[in-house]
Image (spheres, rainbow, N blue to C red):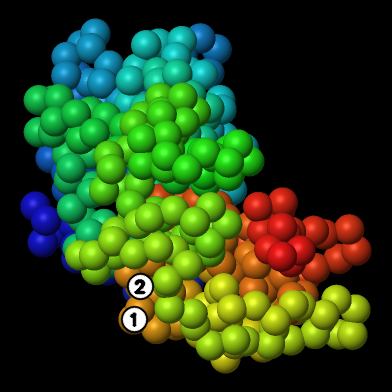
Amino acid sequence: MQDKIIKFVEDLKNRRMSLDSLDEASTRQAVVGKLLHLLGWDIFNVDEVVPEYSVGDTRIDYALKTGKYNDKAFIEVKRIREDLERHQEQLLGYCFKEGVGFAVLTNGIIWWFYLPLRQSSWEERRFYAIDIVQQDSKDVASKFIEFLSKDNIMNGNAIKSAESMYKGRQKDTILDDALPKAWDKMIAEGNNKLIDLIGDVTENLCGFRPDPGMIKRFLSEHEYHMKSVGVLIEKKDRVIKSTDVPKVNTIDIKEDKGTDKGPKKERYGKYAQAISGHITWIKERIANSQDGIVTIKVKELARKMGSDFEKKSDTSIYWALKYVLFYEGIIVDMGTHDDGEKILKMRTKVAGDELPPSLAKFDNE
């Protein structure tokens, strides 16, 4: 099965330009229907695959069933290049109305997978995304089998895998967001019992408690905070004071077109050095973008910066570059790609843009 699906995906990649002319009906026939067949579904058996499934006064393109009255999944198909964003709320509403716990929204190239009955926003219910053109064909085939093959839908393994992925992503996302907030709260209150207290505050913020190792890694990757509280951390199998952490070379962060002169800072010096050779490239991409915003995956940018930065967490790279690039006239925000990876959204700094308090306070030291 996997080899056939890999071949099918490769064929779609090779025919990418010609696929743009397909309308919705042709996309259903040439892409979705054929893929379902390769995944083991009998597309001519309406007890398995129901085309144009009625939901009230509307219709869903496909309902996958385990029996005449047992709906397992809805698939809604749009034409190639259709923007899926504006269709997801409607699809998930139909799923909620019918009590269907698994759904797919696709334009033939992009495939969004949902757990419609979860208690979260529409976007958060999307637990996985496939981009046939951009992603590795073997990985694409593997995920199609995991989530959409007849065997895995019928035996419940697809929904189990989806739930596991959803919960893992949800927990990681919540903790990534809550740890910096917990740290800022600790700094504001001047509390030095970091390991236990960060765990307490993080748990209060998001409901999950990070283990001590996760907190220590967070502290190690955020050395710029340690100086302000003078705590003890474990590093390289020994306990050292944060004031003893070796300083990196001082970097003069360049002046932003004569308007805002960045302070000479030792913190983030390694990041400033690593990103300096890519700043012109980033600015050119921003200038050439249609909306003035450039989106770059954190891991891809880390690889450009060097092997040392590939080991850093997405959050560490985000905060460091948010600070460094601010003085290069670039505003950095973080988001999540359809495939779950963290991305940096970059744009030109304008009047009124400021660093967040947790970073701006370093300029007053």
Against 134, residue 74 (above or below) is above
In the rendered picture of this protein, how many numbered marks are placed on residues?
Answer: 2
Q: Identify the residue under disc 1.
A: 307
User: Which residue is nearer to you in this view: 87 or 212?
Assistant: 212
- Residue type at tag 1: Ser
User: Which residue is nearer to you in this view: 196 or 100?
Assistant: 196
Secondary structure type for disc 2: helix
Q: Residue 160: give x, y in percent of width and height.
A: 19, 29
Quick check: can you spot residue 294?
A: no
Against 154, residue 307 (above or below) is below
Snapshot quadrant of residue 138:
bottom left
Quick check: can you spot residue 67?
A: yes
Q: Are marks 2 and 1 in contact (CB under 8 Å)?
A: yes
Secondary structure type for disc 1: helix
Q: Identify the residue under disc 2.
A: 310
Snapshot quadrant of residue 190:
top right
Q: Residue 228: give x, y in percent of width and height.
A: 57, 57
State the residue at coordinates (38%, 66%): 312
State the residue at coordinates (45%, 82%): 305
Dot 2 alpha-carbon crowd within 10 angstroms: few under 14, some 14 to 19, many 20 or more: some
State the residue at coordinates (47%, 43%): 192
In the rendered view of the protein, which quadrant contains the C terminus?
Answer: bottom right
